[in-house]
Image (cartoon, grey):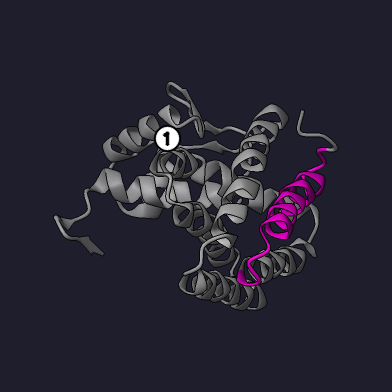
Amino acid sequence: MTTRSGPKSAAQRVYDWVRARILDGTYAGGTLLSEGEVADAVGTSRTPVREAFLQLATQEMLVLYPKRGALVLSVNTPELRDVLAARALVEPWAAALVASYPDRATIVTELRRLTEQATKALAAADDAGFQEADRAFHHWLLAAAGNRLLTTFYSSLRDRQLRSGTLALHNNPGRGAETMAQHSAIADAIEAGDSDRAAAAAASHVQNTALALGLSSLS
């Protein structure tokens, strides 16, 4: 696999490989990763594995243990609460604002396309594909609201959102279908131009995600 700048470096390949398995739950919190095992799996020496581990450690996904490997950090309750509290502030605002746009048809079309994409991934038991499409729905909604600062902030939540989404599905296998119904409700309200209903649908969606993660309150 190549990028515009050429083939990926060995460290980048290891980083992508390990990160994907942390995000989809293959490497759950508490898993101890061995440099040698990862190097063998990806087909590299240990040096790029160390580089990738260092990068993932700076992103608070791993804790390094010299001569032993790296421990996958669990998604903890305070972190989950912080992410969802941030979403509860910005997503209802974005939904209400987009619903007020006279030229919102293209936005709604994309929201529905992403909902359909996630639904197909769910039916195919493609958890990673589902999480990416689910997260893309929310990012598109924020981007459509037109505030670059908030969109950049929201992008910074990406990996935490993906990990929390995987955890929610693990806790409640029916959560995927519920999520798609809630996405459709948000898109319906935006299409109808009902800002109050759109904000309420977005707020309800975040609150239901919190409940699926075992959080009764976001305060």
Q: Quarter of the image holding residue 216?
A: top right
Quadrant that contains the C terminus: top right
Residue sitting nearer the eye, 168 or 137: 137
The answer to whether 207 appears left or right of 58 in the picture is: right
Quadrant that contains the N terminus: bottom left
Residue at the image position 50 percent from the left and 31 percent from the top? 62
Q: Which amino acid does label 1 sit on?
A: Leu
Can residue 27 be seen at all in this image of the molecule? no
Residue furthest to the right in view is 216
Q: Name the residue under label 1.
A: 56
Q: What element carries label 1?
A: helix
Above or below for 168 versus 87: below
How many neighbours does mark 1 have within 10 angstroms: few (below 14), some (14-19), or many (20 or more)? many
Can residue 183 be seen at all in this image of the molecule? yes
The residue segment tinted magenta is 191-215
Residue at the image position 41 percent from the left and 52 percent from the top? 17
The answer to whether 71 appears left or right of 199 in the picture is: left
Above or below for 111 versus 46: below
Residue furthest to the left in view is 5
x and y, in percent, of residue 109 in the image: 51, 76
Residue at the image position 60 percent from the left and 78 percent from the top? 120
Residue sitting nearer the eye, 160 or 153: 153
The answer to whether 14 appears left or right of 158 in the picture is: left
Residue at the image position 28 percent from the left and 43 percent from the top? 11
Q: Tell me the chief SS of the magenta region.
A: helix
x and y, in percent, of residue 213 in the image: 77, 44
53 within the magenta span: no
Residue sitting nearer the eye, 32 or 114: 114
x and y, in percent, of residue 218 in the image: 76, 33
